[in-house]
Image: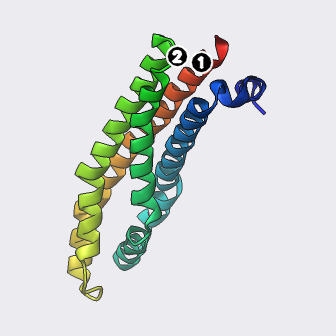
Amino acid sequence: MTPLMQESARQGTAGRGWIGIAVWTTLLALVLVAGLNVTFAAAVMPNLAGADDHTFVTTLQRYNDNAVFPGSYTVALVLAAVAPMVLRRRDPAAVVRWAMVAFALYVVVFVLTMAVNVPLNNEIDAVRDLSDAAALADVRERFETTWVAANAVRTVLSFVAAGALVRALQLRTAR
């Protein structure tokens, strides 16, 4: 158990009841999204880089069918928006500011996801003729470099957002 977690346990869920639970739940959601992003950055996409076009497209189509992804990103957005609001009830301005930084960073992650990654995912999903080698190569060429770059940015930003919320929790437990 980390010192922050030990202190939080002594004070009762980073304290102070339901507000602490709400903020810890937000942190969990942000870390989940960061973990999803880093998994794609460190494992999925590098492993698919050496795959043939058919394997690349069909594998990504399978990922796109998974409801965990949109649900996780959306829940994290809602919780990241709520955290600063609930913290405003009883916490110092510095705590609220760090929660707002976390929210702002996560908004960038969410917008980047919706503006770049999701449309590219939709292009992959639109491929129906998996025997058309030219179509597979074409969609992969349009997809891969841009998607990987956008995912690298959202990976870093999602971890920084989680870090900002950790800082809010640290300040919260230090008072």
Return the mark for residue 11.
none
Q: Which residue is mark 2?
A: 91
Number of marks present in the image shown: 2
Q: Quadrant of the C terminus?
A: top right
Residue drawn at 35 percent across, 30 percent down:
104
Tell me the kind of residue under disc 2.
Asp
Q: Above or below — where is 96 with respect to 106? A: above
Label 1, secondary structure: give it.
helix
User: Contact (CB < 8 A) between labels 1 and 2?
Assistant: yes
Badge 1 or badge 2: first in the primary sequence: 2
Residue at horizontal 23 percent and vertical 68 percent from the top: 123
Q: Nearer the viewer, residue 15 or 60?
A: 15
Q: Tell me where residue 113 appears, x and y as whole percent.
A: 31, 50
Is 121 on the left-hand or right-hand side of 48?
left
| Of residues 148 and 77, the one drawn nearer to the viewer in this rendering | 77
Tell me if I can see residue 55 in this picture. Answer: yes
Q: Position of residue 118 (x, y in %)?
A: 28, 58
Left/right of residue 14 with respect to residue 143 in the rendered view: right
Q: Is residue 95 above or below residue 148?
A: above
Whether residue 146 can be seen here: no
Circle nearer the viewer, 1 or 2 = 2
Tell me where residue 71 sits by quadrant: bottom left
Q: Look at 35% across and 74% down and name the residue there.
A: 57
Q: Is residue 97 left or right of residue 39?
A: left
Amino acid type, label 1: Arg
Q: Mark 2 Cα within 10 Å, few/some/many (few <14, many 20+)? A: some
Residue 4 x, y percent position in the rendering: 70, 25
Q: Is residue 8 above or below residue 159?
A: above
Q: Note whether 98 is above or below 153 in the view shown.
A: above
**What residue is at 21 percent from the left and 71 percent from the top?**
138
Q: Which numbered dot is residue 172? A: 1
* Mark 2, secondary structure of its residue: loop
